[in-house]
C-alpha cells in the first residue's frame, strides 16, 4: 500500500492508470527539480552518425498529455471512424500491458488484433459502455482499420509512442526520431539511485552513520558533507 498526501492507495491504482498517464508521472518523478529532459540520439545520416544532445521542456511534455486527457475526459472513450461509422476505443492501461505480456500469440498480426479487440468498446443506444470481448469478429478489423486505430491511439496518448523531429547540428539533416520516454525516465531514476548509493557509501565510510541516518539528511546537507570529504582528500594528496 502506498500513501500520497496522507491518502492510502492500493497497488492496483497505478496499474489502472493509462500508459500515457504512467509515463507522465514517471517524467515528473524522475525530473524533480529540473525543467528540462535531456537525452542523446545518434544522427541517422550515414556520413555523420554523430551523437546529438537533445533537451525537451518537461512542462511541455506534461501539458501535451494533460491536453489530450482533457479532450477525452468527458466520456472516457475515443471515437474512431471506420467504414463510415464511429467505433469506440479506450486508452490502454498498465493492467492491459501485464495481460498482454502474459498472453501468447502465433504472430505479430494476431498480437495486434488481440490488443485492439481488448481496447474496443461497445456503446449502446443509451450511451452505456461495455468492453467488446469477442463482439468484433476478426474479419471486421482490416489492416486499414488497424492503421486508423493506431493513429487514433497515438493522438490520444502522445507520450506512449513519442516522435520528435530533430535537426542534426553537425550535418544539418532533419529526421523523425522515436523517443522511448518511459525508458529514458527509468534510466534517469536508475542513475539517481546509483548516485544515492555512492553518497551513502562515502558518508558511511567517513562518519560511520547508518543508511537511515544518512537518508534522513536533507540532500543539500549530504552534498555539503561530501564536499568536505573531497576537500580533505585533496588536502591530504
Image (cartoon, rainbow, N blue to C red):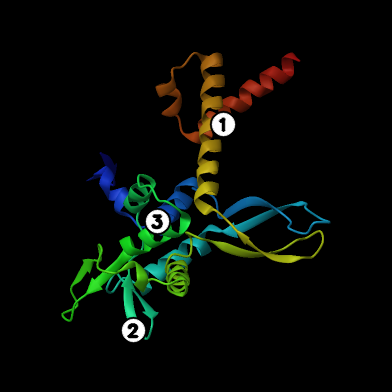
Q: Nearer the viewer, residue 198 or 139?
A: 139
Query: Label 1 near label 3: C-beta < 8 Å?
Result: no
Q: Position of residue 85 (x, y in %)?
A: 33, 84
| 3 or 2: tag closer to the N-terminus | 3
Residue at 37% across / 67% down in the picture? Answer: 69
Above or below, 30 against 145 in this view is above
**From mark 3 to mark 2, how far is it between C-alphas?**
27 Å
Disc 2 target residue: 85
Residue at the extreme left: 126
Left or right placement of residue 73 versus residue 197 in this view: left
User: Closer to the observer: label 3 or label 1?
Assistant: 3
Q: Position of residue 20 (x, y in %)?
A: 42, 59
Q: Position of residue 229 (x, y in %)?
A: 62, 21
Query: Label 2 near label 3: C-beta < 8 Å?
Result: no
Disc 1 target residue: 223
Checking the image for residue 19, the label placed there is 3
- Label 2 packing within 10 angstroms: few (<14), some (14-19), many (20+): few
- Label 1 packing within 10 angstroms: few (<14), some (14-19), many (20+): some
Amino acid at each position: 500500500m502506498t500513501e500520497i498526501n496522507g491518502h492510502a492507495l492500493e497497488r492496483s491504482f497505478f496499474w489502472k492508470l493509462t500508459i500515457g498517464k504512467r509515463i507522465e508521472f514517471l517524467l515528473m518523478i524522475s525530473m524533480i527539480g529540473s525543467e528540462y529532459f535531456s537525452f542523446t540520439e545518434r544522427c541517422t545520416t550515414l556520413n555523420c552518425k554523430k551523437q546529438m544532445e537533445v533537451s525537451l521542456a518537461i512542462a511541455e511534455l506534461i501539458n501535451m498529455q494533460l491536453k489530450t486527457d482533457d479532450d477525452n475526459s468527458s466520456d472516457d472513450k475515443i471515437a474512431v471512424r471506420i467504414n463510415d461509422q464511429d467505433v469506440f476505443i479506450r486508452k490502454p492501461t498498465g493492467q492491459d500491458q501485464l495481460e498482454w505480456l502474459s498472453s501468447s500469440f502465433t504472430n505479430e498480426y494476431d498480437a495486434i488484433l488481440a490488443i485492439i479487440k481488448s481496447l474496443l468498446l461497445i456503446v449502446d443506444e443509451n450511451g452505456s459502455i461495455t468492453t467488446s470481448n469477442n463482439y468484433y469478429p476478426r474479419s471486421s478489423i482490416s489492416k486499414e482499420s488497424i492503421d486508423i486505430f493506431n493513429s487514433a491511439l497515438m493522438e490520444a496518448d502522445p507520450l506512449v509512442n513519442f516522435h520528435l523531429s530533430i535537426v542534426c547540428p553537425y550535418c544539418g539533416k532533419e529526421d523523425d526520431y522515436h523517443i522511448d520516454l518511459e525508458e529514458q525516465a527509468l534510466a534517469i531514476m536508475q542513475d539517481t539511485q546509483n548516485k544515492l548509493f555512492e553518497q551513502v557509501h562515502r558518508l558511511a565510510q567517513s562518519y560511520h552513520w547508518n543508511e537511515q541516518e544518512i537518508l534522513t539528511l536533507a540532500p543539500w546537507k549530504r552534498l555539503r558533507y561530501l564536499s568536505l570529504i573531497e576537500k580533505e582528500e585533496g588536502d591530504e594528496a
